[in-house]
Image (cartoon, grey):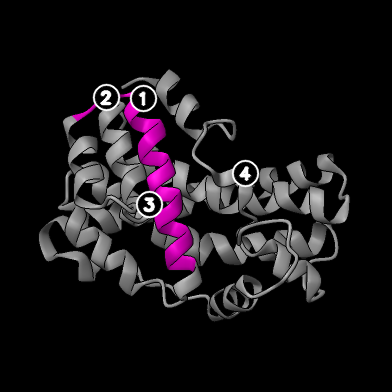
């Protein structure tokens, strides 16, 4: 297992398109639900235990070698918002392109052929982790970290929030990030024997509703 590969994959500068997304933070800022570091922490904690957990379990299951077609259907079922489904597939397509350049793999090639418009991003993340020689827990950590680091980074731009404050939010959430990643791997291991219904389906209705509203804005800084 290559820790160097994990650092490359988790790096925000990896060209997978995540920088263009706020993870719902832009809508939350406009609605007044995120106004500073304290409310950002609450927002990120909510994402961590819903979107983060679901994405991490899907990624871990893909890294374990589960059928990506079945996992993609499971991801679809867990993403009610059409806007978020579209965004996830676009991110998946971009991640596939970057991953095939970094870690050439027959599995990534097959995934690209099966989903020319992109598989869901967490599924691609797990297949990428396999191609990079990483473990399921590494894929889970990448997913949960993305679920909170994206909104934290976006809020710095949206509110002019002190970047030290945003980084402090991520540091304070680190113990919970560990627990969510570990829970995601356990769920993925159960799903290996029980099927995709054993994967978490934690919902965040306000994120889904806000994403649909955000998609219709005439002017926005982020894609989601």
Q: Nearer the viewer, mark 3 or mark 2?
A: 2
Mark 2 = which residue?
A: 104
Name the residue beneath numbered marker 4: 19
92 or 54: which is nearer to us? 92
Residue 170 at x, y percent in the picture: 67, 46
Q: Is residue 39 magenta?
A: no
Q: Are marks 1 and 2 in contact (CB under 8 Å)?
A: yes
Direction from residue 30 to residue 8 in the image, left or right:
left
Q: CA distance from mark 3 to mark 4?
A: 16 Å
Instruction: Decide if residue 208 is on the left or right side of residue 95.
Output: right
Residue 122 badge:
3
Give, as a single range, the part of the protein colored magenta.
Answer: 84-105
Residue 75 x/y as whole percent: 32, 64
Contact? badges 3 and 4 (CB < 8 Å): no
* Quadrant in the rendering for residue 22: bottom right
Give the overall secondary structure of the magenta segment: helix
């Amino acid at each position: 297992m290559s820790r160097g590969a994990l650092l490359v994959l988790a790096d925000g500068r990896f060209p997978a398109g995540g920088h263009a997304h706020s993870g719902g933070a832009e809508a939350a800022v406009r609605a007044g639900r995120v106004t500073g570091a304290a409310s950002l922490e609450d927002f990120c904690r909510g994402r961590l235990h819903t979107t983060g957990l679901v994405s991490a379990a899907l990624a871990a299951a893909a890294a374990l070698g589960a059928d990506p077609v079945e996992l993609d259907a499971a991801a679809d079922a867990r993403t009610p918002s059409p806007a978020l489904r579209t965004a996830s597939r676009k991110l998946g397509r971009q991640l596939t392109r970057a991953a095939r350049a970094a870690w050439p793999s027959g599995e990534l090639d097959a995934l690209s052929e099966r989903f020319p418009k992109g598989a869901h991003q967490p599924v691609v993340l797990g297949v990428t982790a396999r191609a990079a020689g990483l473990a399921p827990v590494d894929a889970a950590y990448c997913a949960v970290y993305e679920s909170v680091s994206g909104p934290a980074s976006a809020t710095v731009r949206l509110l002019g929030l002190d970047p030290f404050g945003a980084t402090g939010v991520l540091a304070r959430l680190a113990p919970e990030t560990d627990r969510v990643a570990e829970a995601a791997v356990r769920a993925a291991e159960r799903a290996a024997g029980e099927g995709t219904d054993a994967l978490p389906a934690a919902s965040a209705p306000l994120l889904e509703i806000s994403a649909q509203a955000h998609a219709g804005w005439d002017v926005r800084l982020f894609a989601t």
